[in-house]
Image (cartoon, helix red, strand yellow):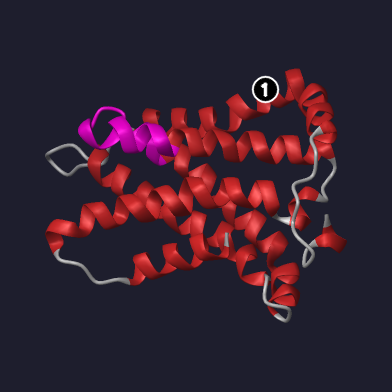
Amino acid sequence: MLLAFGGTCVVASWRVRPENLAAKRLVVDLSGGIVLPLLCFAYDPILRGWTPKGRAAVYLAVGFQILLLAAWKLVGPATRRHAGFFAGAFSVGVILAALIGTFLLPFSMIGLLIGIGVLGFTPFLTAWVLARNVGQAFRQALPPSHKRPDSWPLVAGLLTAIGVPGLIYLVAGDVIGGLLERLPTPAFGPFFGPFS
């Protein structure tokens, strides 16, 4: 996981030719916006220490953002019509990732003393990835006349990013929390033993 985080940061800082910029951004988006958040949910000892219902709420919200980012990478850049929706939805993801990163910040700072805290900065990397995609989607949503885009897709994206995970949580939060409680804790190895 540390290698994935370090590799993403290195790739993000590389200077590349303009023709290779899209490939670089895709690698950073997929690793920083999809792979690393999933790894953090599986192996971060602080996140795994939350109550099952609390984890269910966060997993649903972040999982929905991961699905939206994957959909945007597949079909979003090809159409201007839905770009405003993604810009609105990713705005919620930026705030969510920044809040999670802020919550983990004290633990990450302490963890830096023993060499593992750098992984706690993953939510900030995810927030940066999503913020860059907000900008890309918003620019793409601009009409050719460069006037303001319609606001209804932005609002629809915001409401969807909040409403869908919230509704699932209201309907099935107890069930999901119970399933998370029964999941086995992954082996963290001897170094993470006390935290698992």
The main secondary structure of the magenta stretch is helix
Q: Which residue is drawn at 45% across and 32% down?
A: 157
Is 72 magenta? The answer is yes
Compared to 150, does 4 lie above or below? below
Q: Residue at x 39, y 28 (%)?
A: 152
Quadrant where the N terminus is found in the figure = bottom right
Q: Which residue is drawn at 21% across and 58% down?
A: 21
Tell me if 178 is positioned left or right of 166 in this view: right
Compared to 26, does 120 lie above or below? below
Residue 86 x %, y %: 39, 36
- Decide which of 190, 127 is in the foreground and name it: 190
Compared to 120, does 115 lie above or below? below
Q: Mark 1 points at which residue?
A: 168
Tell me if 96 is positioned left or right of 11 in this view: right
* Range shown magenta: 69-87
Q: Residue at x 35, y 53 (%)?
A: 27
The total number of labels drawn is 1
